[in-house]
Amino acid sequence: MRMDNERESANLEDRRGGGYGGGGGRGISIGGAGGIGGLGLVAVVIISLLFGVDPSTILGGLEGGGAPSPGYQQQQARGPAPPQEDASARFVSRVLASTEDVWTAEFQRQGRQYAAPRLVLFSGAVQSGCGAAQSAMGPFYCPNDRRVYLDLSFFREMSQRLGAPGDFAQAYVVAHEVGHHVQNLLGILGRNQQAQQANQRDANAISVRTELMADCFAGYWARRADEMRQILEQGDIEEGMGAAAAVGDDRLQSRSGRGQVVPETFTHGSSAQRVQSFKTGMAAQDPGACINRR
Ligand SMILES: [Zn+2]
């Protein structure tokens, strides 16, 4: 991607340990000694929440379980973020700014006003309007406080463990979460969450629909952003599709070690569905194409 000359967003909140703006940066994070040891558990949690909307229900379940799992331990607040993370933070800020430009124009075209979300960078753990969250749960959007939460270490996870490297793969993550914010502004998120509560049997299917729509919005952002600012380079779209495939429920389930893929338990959609949704968004003339697709 060509992002170095793009503007940064004013809606980035840095709550990483040692950063300014503190408050949430106090860290419970994955314990040092074992490192790899706890990852089995971590992987399961990632599966349930990767690119999630609102962790509060699942967090509720975890909190009911009593003591924190042995994979976690208290850690001292970290020092200033390492330099490569700051380049990464700036990149995220520029992608966020680009989503603001695209969605502001899009809402305007529909005679509406776009209220941009804030994006919180954190390390280890964070307090959100949807409850406490750990970075192992992956990035998420909280509709209660209209914030996207992201630990930059997730990008390392994507690149090294999920096999989805590249800057556009990262941009896709941000654009997907912003997609949930767009759903929130349009009233879709609230409606879908109500429907899920009213009908437990269809809850997973509704979740998949919600997630695929966010993937589609991410594709739409990519195309419009490129039309506005020519930010895409050769290979970027492939990276985005690789990322969409890497976080498909079937791919994640088969990676989780149990070697079993159970479509009824999908909450985000299969790799093929996620790639297809992203492509649909890329090709769409109007984001309505993402909302009305089945
Ligand atoms: Zn999502």
Image (cartoon, helix red, strand yellow):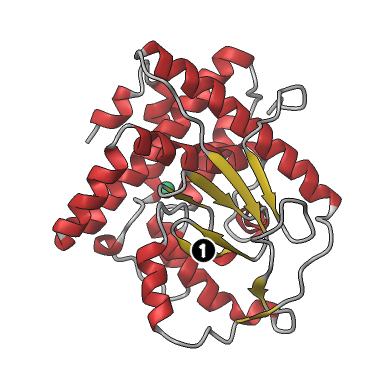
Question: Can residue 78 be seen?
Answer: yes
Point out the image quarter for the N terminus. top right
- Rendering coords of residue 28 (x, y %): 64, 73
Task: Please indicate whether residue 34 sits to the left or right of residue 146 in the image.
Answer: right
Q: Is residue 211 above or below residue 93?
A: below
Q: What is the three-letter code of the residue carrying label 1? A: Met
Residue situated in front as seen by the camera: 23 or 273: 23
Can you say whether 276 is above or below 281 in the image? below
Horizontal side, residue 201 vs residue 184: left or right: left
Nearer-the-camera pick, 294 or 246: 294
Q: Answer left or right for 283 relative to 121.
A: left
Residue located at (58% from left, 43% from top): 119
Q: Can the viewer see residue 273?
A: no
Give residue 236's position: percent from left, percent from top.
61, 31
Disc 1 crowd, CA 10 A, few/some/many (<14, 14-19, 20+): many
Compared with 5, 49 (above or below) is below
Q: State whether residue 57 is above or below residue 76.
A: above
Q: Position of residue 29 (x, y in %)?
A: 65, 72
Identify the element where label 1 is drawn: helix
The reply, left or right, for residue 206 in relation to residue 271 is left
Write the residue at 50% across / 19% down: 224
Q: Which residue is mark 1?
A: 137
Could you tell me residue 258's position as x and y percent?
42, 76
